Amino acid sequence: MRKARSLVFAVCTMLGMCLAVSVHAHEIPYFKDAVARGELPKMPSRLPDTPKVVPLLAEQVLGKYGGTLQSLISSPSDVKLMFVYGYARLVGYNADLKLEADIVESFNVDQNRVFTFKLRKNHRWSDGAPFTSEDFRYWWEDVANNRKLSPTGPPAVLSVEGEYPKVSFPDELTVRYEWTRPNPNFLSLIAGASPLLIYRPSHYLKPLHEKYADKSKMSKIQKIKFKAWASNHNRRDNLYKFDNPDLPTLQPWRNTTAAPANRFVGVRNPFFHRVDQEGRQLPYIDRVILSISEGKLISAKAASGDVDLQARAIKLQDATFLKENEKRSNYSVRLWETVRGSHFVLYPNLNVVDPVWRKLIRDVRLRRALSLGIDREEINDVLFFGLAAEGNNTAQKQSPFYSEDLKNRWATLNIEKANELLDDLGLTKRNDEGIRLLPNGEPFLMIVETAGESSEQADVLELIRDSWRELGISLFIKPSQRSVFRNRIFAGETVMSVWGGLENGVPNAISSPAVLAPTSQTSYQWPKWGQYHETKGQSGEPVDMPEAQHLNELYLRWLNAATDGEREEIWKEMLDIHAEQQFTIGVVSGILQPVVVKNRLKNVPKKAIFNWNPGAQFGIYHPDTFWFEDAGEEK
């Protein structure tokens, strides 16, 4: 272990200002015995030379050490929420959704082409091994560019118009990614809830790699087993999945439980790089326990007081029941706003194979008529207590791009206008039941496919069915398993599907508008165009609709834009095209997310946004600063 250093360090911001902060001399109670036995160095020696100082948010206060936070998950794979909520990222979003240095000490961006990261001196992995540029080099050279570990090469998201970056490591604390063309997506990728991870604990993984393993010391049986080294390496290399308790981490808590298990225990990382404003190492809470429960029982268990913090598997419809039990179970229910572009979205498949449907779906008059024929106010009142926002799948009110026009264009109930548009399409004939007839003489039966995972989706569709009936359209709901659901969309067998809206409903100039252009197969309104983009023309179909082609052109302009002003104008134009074309049909947004918080748990915001990316749900509010009022040590 390195020698103890000064208890005072300077924290420098990217603006060049420095703040002197003293490292707290008192040891964390959880580690006192280990320090006394010589198993761990004292707190000042466990921190980087320049720790990340976490500023308090409004209504937050300095906390106490200790305690165990209990929460529920519905699947063993949800153990990854320790990684998500811990939200230690090279560069991360703060509560204002602005990017700032976190794991790295600083970063510099030159023309959106060259990204230079400066690491914190003496920063260490959770097992005490140094965190240096070697961990970045190992991932880039020995994992991402090793065909046995990564058969398709480095992640496609690192490719800019077919070009991968030049990656260099000038010294043990410097990492540089360089492209010849701008890559404004890069920082948001590494800041995500499920981020692009461009580093690995090389000291742990090297012995598993054929390049570094010493086969001369292996027995005959060990050599035979080592032939499967690549699959063994990939199985253990799960920084995000968080299911390998032996894998060192940089998160505030490290998982100590191997799967399969019904209860995952995270304990504090002794080498975590953040401190509070008094220089005390974070996190405040010693342990996080995620216990598995059947999803439909989670709200009931939360109401019984079984959790300290819970949002997973809780819906707005549970809020009344949860509120009724607040006093009895000693918790409070907070309602955080969600900020997806829309909570519920209909996706007309522009790449549907059936020629009759393809022609109809690609006619904007049909998409507009379907949108005008939805009684969003009724859906809001019946299912969301009138608390949701009605309108399109677009930027939300917290975004600088929000406007009432974008929200409401073609998205207010107008049965008369919708019927006029359908008549203009030539769909004037009806059967004896009043259902319009398609050009081939068949009844206008709109089959809307779902992943079958949400009763709420079925409830919304039942209400849409009633109002579409006034248009002479019959709606049939077809649920299936998620894999089947997705594959049918990708193959063009689905006419219309249901999913959530824009994941980032609070974009700004530096947010990527890729999702607004045909760039991904998982955009259910144009899966084959997205696949064509992703495979560089090897699969899928080329875009053959002028408005969608223009979206691709705008996205390319955004990638190469020199200023935020240019990017803002591009965003606005792309959002305007979507509102006008109704490529996706939004219904309601701003759904309130109930968050159950035990009264003794402090520093959890009373008002906040609840979003996956950006946001990492609780992540941007720093759960490492949450603390228990009845914890052992006073401030």
Image: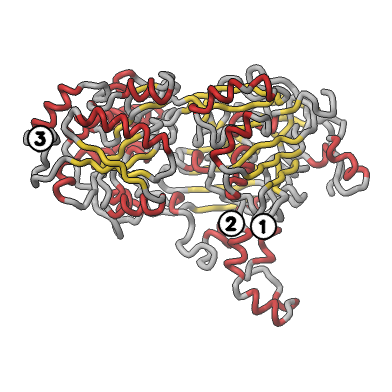
Say which element carries label 3. Answer: loop
- Between residue 500 and residue 572, name the one nearer to us: 500
Query: Is mark 1 in CB contact (under 8 Å) with mark 2?
Result: yes
List x then y, in percent, for residue 525: 29, 42
Say which element carries label 1. Answer: helix
Q: How many residues crowd mark 3 within 10 Å: few (<14), some (14–19), many (20+)?
A: some
Residue 618 placement: quadrant: top right
Would you name the residue on which mark 3 appears?
425
Question: Is residue 552 visible in this depiction of the protein?
Answer: no
Going by the numbered disc 3, the residue's amino acid type is Leu
Query: CA gap, disc 1 to disc 3?
Result: 62 Å
- Asked if residue 7 lies left or right of residue 301, the reply is right
Would you name the residue on which mark 1 appears?
202
- Asked if residue 530 lies left or right of residue 339, the reply is left
Would you name the residue on which mark 2 appears?
139
Q: Which label was assigned to residue 253?
A: none
Query: CA gap, disc 2 to disc 3?
Result: 55 Å
Residue 491 placement: quadrant: bottom left
Indicate which disc, 1 or 3, sits on the residue closer to the N terminus: 1
